[in-house]
Image (spheres, helix red, strand yellow):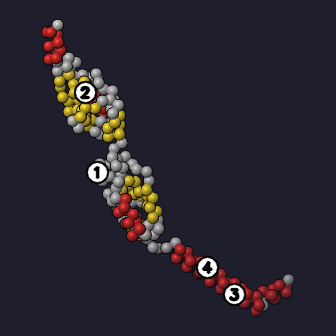
């Protein structure tokens, strides 16, 4: 036991302890310095506002800012933004992030998805309007023609052209209903008189 205490007070032991403490301090200093450089500690980049930029413009801005990006699936079409432009980003503009951080983008698709025109021939104008609205189409105008069924839908038009149930139109399209006014068509009167 006495030899042990003598060893603890010896010059060799004290030199070894001092060397170990010094090496530990140097090692900690080197590790902290290395972490500082590799993690860019204290160095931040402000995320730019990418909204309404095209994908090509966004790529250049991301690279200039020292960031990375990933484009997520396109969202629903937003008419307030140009086609194929950025409509959402995460993290948002103005956020401070480290360089090389990945920014996630949502891109505006090329247009509204297409919907199928429902079967509204020989349906009342009121019901037809409800059915069209349910699939995302709107009635822009109602035109009346001489047909016996008052307010009954006889035909449909889109941009001046006749369409039929089952056709595909972009969502939010506006259609024209051709409805009966309750009058007997002239052709039916002529046919009845000829008999």
Q: CA distance from mark 3 to mark 1?
A: 69 Å
Q: Which residue is mark 1?
A: 80
Asked which secondary structure carries label 4, the reply is helix
Q: Which residue is mark 3?
A: 19
User: Which of disc 1 and disc 2 is earlier in sequence?
Assistant: 1
Of badges 2 and 4, nearer the viewer stands: 2
Of badges 2 and 3, nearer the viewer stands: 2
Residue 161 versus residue 112 in the image, above or below: above
Q: Which residue is mark 4?
A: 28
Residue 94, given in percent of the width and then of the height, sits at 37, 64
Of badges 2 and 1, nearer the viewer stands: 2
Answer left or right for 174 relative to 51.
Answer: left
Contact flag, marks 2 and 4 (Cβ < 8 Å) = no
Q: CA distance from mark 1 to mark 4?
A: 55 Å
Asked which secondary structure carries label 2, the reply is strand
User: Which of disc 3 and disc 2 is earlier in sequence?
Assistant: 3
Please tell me in which quadrant of the rendered image residue 156 appears.
Answer: top left
User: Which of disc 3 and disc 4 is earlier in sequence?
Assistant: 3
Q: Which residue is mark 2?
A: 155
Q: CA distance from mark 4 to mark 3?
A: 14 Å
The mark tally for this picture is 4
User: Which of disc 4 and disc 2 is earlier in sequence?
Assistant: 4
120, 21: nearer the viewer = 120
Asked which secondary structure carries label 1, the reply is loop
Please name the residue shown 85% across and 83% down the image. 1
């Amino acid at each position: 036991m006495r030899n042990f205490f003598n060893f603890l007070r010896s010059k060799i032991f004290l030199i070894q302890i001092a060397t170990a403490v010094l090496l530990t301090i140097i090692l900690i200093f080197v590790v902290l310095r290395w972490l500082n450089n590799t993690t860019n500690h204290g160095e931040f980049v402000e995320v730019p506002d990418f909204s309404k930029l095209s994908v090509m413009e966004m790529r250049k801005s991301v690279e200039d800012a020292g960031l990375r990006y990933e484009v997520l699936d396109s969202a629903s079409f937003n008419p307030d933004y140009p086609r194929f432009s950025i409509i959402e980003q995460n993290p948002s503009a103005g956020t401070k992030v480290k360089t090389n951080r990945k920014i996630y983008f949502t891109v505006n698709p090329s247009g509204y998805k297409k919907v199928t025109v429902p079967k509204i021939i020989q349906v009342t104008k009121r019901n037809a309007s409800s059915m069209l609205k349910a699939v995302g189409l709107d009635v822009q105008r109602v035109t009346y023609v001489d047909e016996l069924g008052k307010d009954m839908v006889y035909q449909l038009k889109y941009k001046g052209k006749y369409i039929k149930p089952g056709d595909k139109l972009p969502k939010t399209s506006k259609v024209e209903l051709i409805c009966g006014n309750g009058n007997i068509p002239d052709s039916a009167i002529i046919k009845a008189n000829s008999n």
